[in-house]
Amino acid sequence: MKLSVKYSAEYSFEPMAIEDYDEIYALWDGVPGLGLSSADSREGIAAYLAHNPGQSFVCKASGRIAGAILCGSDGRRAYIHHTVVAPEHQRKGLASELVRLATAAQKELGLQKCHLFLIVDNESGEAFWRALGFEKRRDIGVMSKNL
Protein backbone atom coordinates (compact mmCIF):
# COMPACT_ATOMS: atom_id res chain seq x y z
CA MET A 1 0.00 0.00 0.00
CA LYS A 2 1.25 3.51 -0.80
CA LEU A 3 2.58 5.51 2.11
CA SER A 4 0.50 8.54 1.15
CA VAL A 5 -2.58 8.74 -1.03
CA LYS A 6 -3.65 12.04 -2.60
CA TYR A 7 -7.45 12.11 -2.45
CA SER A 8 -8.09 15.57 -3.83
CA ALA A 9 -6.38 18.94 -3.96
CA GLU A 10 -7.42 19.45 -0.33
CA TYR A 11 -7.07 15.98 1.25
CA SER A 12 -4.46 13.25 1.55
CA PHE A 13 -4.34 9.98 3.48
CA GLU A 14 -1.43 8.29 5.18
CA PRO A 15 -0.76 5.64 7.81
CA MET A 16 -1.35 6.85 11.35
CA ALA A 17 1.83 7.88 13.18
CA ILE A 18 2.21 8.41 16.91
CA GLU A 19 3.59 11.88 16.17
CA ASP A 20 0.01 12.90 15.30
CA TYR A 21 -1.41 11.50 18.57
CA ASP A 22 -2.32 14.83 20.21
CA GLU A 23 -4.35 15.99 17.19
CA ILE A 24 -5.97 12.58 16.74
CA TYR A 25 -6.91 12.30 20.42
CA ALA A 26 -8.40 15.81 20.42
CA LEU A 27 -10.49 14.85 17.39
CA TRP A 28 -11.65 11.58 19.00
CA ASP A 29 -12.43 13.35 22.27
CA GLY A 30 -14.50 16.05 20.58
CA VAL A 31 -16.91 13.78 18.74
CA PRO A 32 -20.06 12.46 20.43
CA GLY A 33 -20.66 8.73 20.13
CA LEU A 34 -17.00 7.75 20.40
CA GLY A 35 -15.94 6.19 23.70
CA LEU A 36 -12.38 6.63 24.93
CA SER A 37 -10.61 4.77 27.71
CA SER A 38 -7.19 4.48 29.32
CA ALA A 39 -6.23 2.16 26.44
CA ASP A 40 -6.31 5.26 24.24
CA SER A 41 -3.37 6.86 26.06
CA ARG A 42 -0.34 7.85 23.99
CA GLU A 43 1.46 4.73 25.24
CA GLY A 44 -1.53 2.52 24.46
CA ILE A 45 -1.91 3.84 20.93
CA ALA A 46 1.86 3.65 20.32
CA ALA A 47 1.81 -0.02 21.33
CA TYR A 48 -1.26 -0.66 19.15
CA LEU A 49 0.35 0.96 16.10
CA ALA A 50 3.58 -0.97 16.65
CA HIS A 51 1.61 -4.24 16.86
CA ASN A 52 -0.51 -3.34 13.79
CA PRO A 53 1.74 -1.34 11.44
CA GLY A 54 0.14 0.22 8.37
CA GLN A 55 -3.41 -0.68 9.38
CA SER A 56 -4.61 2.64 10.87
CA PHE A 57 -4.88 5.82 8.81
CA VAL A 58 -5.33 9.57 9.01
CA CYS A 59 -6.74 12.07 6.59
CA LYS A 60 -4.97 15.41 6.42
CA ALA A 61 -6.10 18.78 5.13
CA SER A 62 -3.41 21.46 4.90
CA GLY A 63 -1.16 19.31 7.10
CA ARG A 64 -3.74 19.04 9.91
CA ILE A 65 -5.68 15.93 10.94
CA ALA A 66 -9.17 15.99 9.43
CA GLY A 67 -10.03 12.34 10.13
CA ALA A 68 -8.67 9.09 11.52
CA ILE A 69 -9.38 5.39 11.78
CA LEU A 70 -7.83 3.02 14.33
CA CYS A 71 -7.75 -0.48 12.91
CA GLY A 72 -5.77 -3.61 13.62
CA SER A 73 -6.06 -7.36 13.84
CA ASP A 74 -5.47 -10.31 16.09
CA GLY A 75 -4.23 -12.39 13.15
CA ARG A 76 -7.69 -13.87 12.51
CA ARG A 77 -10.04 -10.90 12.38
CA ALA A 78 -9.70 -7.18 11.77
CA TYR A 79 -11.09 -4.72 14.32
CA ILE A 80 -12.05 -1.09 13.83
CA HIS A 81 -12.05 0.85 17.07
CA HIS A 82 -12.31 4.56 16.28
CA THR A 83 -13.36 6.22 13.04
CA VAL A 84 -13.98 9.95 12.96
CA VAL A 85 -13.93 12.94 10.64
CA ALA A 86 -13.99 16.49 11.96
CA PRO A 87 -17.44 18.06 11.50
CA GLU A 88 -16.18 20.70 9.08
CA HIS A 89 -14.81 17.96 6.79
CA GLN A 90 -17.77 15.58 6.87
CA ARG A 91 -19.95 14.60 3.91
CA LYS A 92 -16.99 14.47 1.52
CA GLY A 93 -16.39 10.72 1.46
CA LEU A 94 -13.43 10.93 3.84
CA ALA A 95 -14.71 8.42 6.40
CA SER A 96 -15.55 5.96 3.64
CA GLU A 97 -12.04 6.36 2.23
CA LEU A 98 -10.52 5.78 5.69
CA VAL A 99 -12.56 2.57 5.97
CA ARG A 100 -11.57 1.51 2.45
CA LEU A 101 -7.88 1.98 3.22
CA ALA A 102 -8.07 0.16 6.56
CA THR A 103 -10.04 -2.79 5.21
CA ALA A 104 -7.77 -3.01 2.13
CA ALA A 105 -4.79 -3.27 4.48
CA GLN A 106 -6.58 -6.09 6.30
CA LYS A 107 -7.33 -7.90 3.03
CA GLU A 108 -3.65 -7.65 2.09
CA LEU A 109 -2.89 -9.48 5.35
CA GLY A 110 -5.26 -12.27 4.31
CA LEU A 111 -8.04 -11.43 6.76
CA GLN A 112 -11.57 -12.17 5.63
CA LYS A 113 -13.74 -10.44 8.23
CA CYS A 114 -13.72 -7.12 10.04
CA HIS A 115 -15.55 -6.36 13.27
CA LEU A 116 -16.09 -2.93 14.74
CA PHE A 117 -17.07 -1.48 18.06
CA LEU A 118 -19.96 0.97 18.15
CA ILE A 119 -21.62 2.68 21.12
CA VAL A 120 -25.08 1.09 21.39
CA ASP A 121 -27.18 4.25 20.93
CA ASN A 122 -25.04 5.76 18.16
CA GLU A 123 -27.75 5.73 15.48
CA SER A 124 -25.91 7.90 12.96
CA GLY A 125 -22.82 5.71 13.37
CA GLU A 126 -24.86 2.57 12.82
CA ALA A 127 -26.42 4.07 9.67
CA PHE A 128 -22.95 4.96 8.35
CA TRP A 129 -21.61 1.44 8.89
CA ARG A 130 -24.71 -0.19 7.38
CA ALA A 131 -24.28 1.98 4.26
CA LEU A 132 -20.77 0.52 3.93
CA GLY A 133 -22.09 -3.05 4.09
CA PHE A 134 -21.49 -3.82 7.77
CA GLU A 135 -24.21 -5.83 9.49
CA LYS A 136 -25.29 -5.63 13.10
CA ARG A 137 -24.72 -8.95 14.82
CA ARG A 138 -27.57 -10.19 16.96
CA ASP A 139 -25.93 -13.48 17.89
CA ILE A 140 -22.95 -12.14 19.84
CA GLY A 141 -22.24 -9.37 22.32
CA VAL A 142 -19.15 -7.91 23.89
CA MET A 143 -18.06 -8.59 27.45
CA SER A 144 -15.12 -6.85 29.10
CA LYS A 145 -13.00 -7.10 32.22
CA ASN A 146 -10.52 -4.55 33.49
CA LEU A 147 -7.10 -6.08 33.98
Image: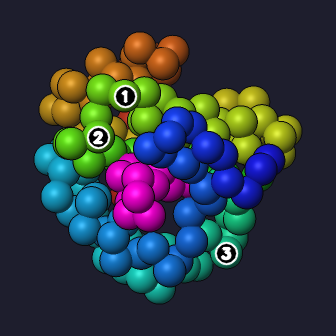
Distance from label 1 to label 2 (Cα)?
7 Å
Disc 2 secondary structure class: helix
Name the residue: 69% across, 70% down.
51
* Residue hosting label 2: 89
Q: Position of residue 43 (x, y in %)?
A: 47, 85
Query: Which residue type carries mark 2?
Result: His
Which numbered tag is attached to residue 92?
A: 1
| Nearest to the observer: residue 63 or residue 32 | 63
Distance from label 3 to label 2 (Cα)?
28 Å
Labelled pair 1, 2 in contact (Cβ < 8 Å): yes
Q: Position of residue 146 (x, y in %)?
A: 35, 72
Name the residue: 44% across, 64% down.
63
Q: Quadrant of residue 64?
A: bottom left
Name the residue: 83% across, 40% down.
108
Residue 32 appears in the rendering: yes
Q: Earlier in the sequence, mark 3 or mark 2?
A: 3
Q: Which residues are magenta?
A: 57-70
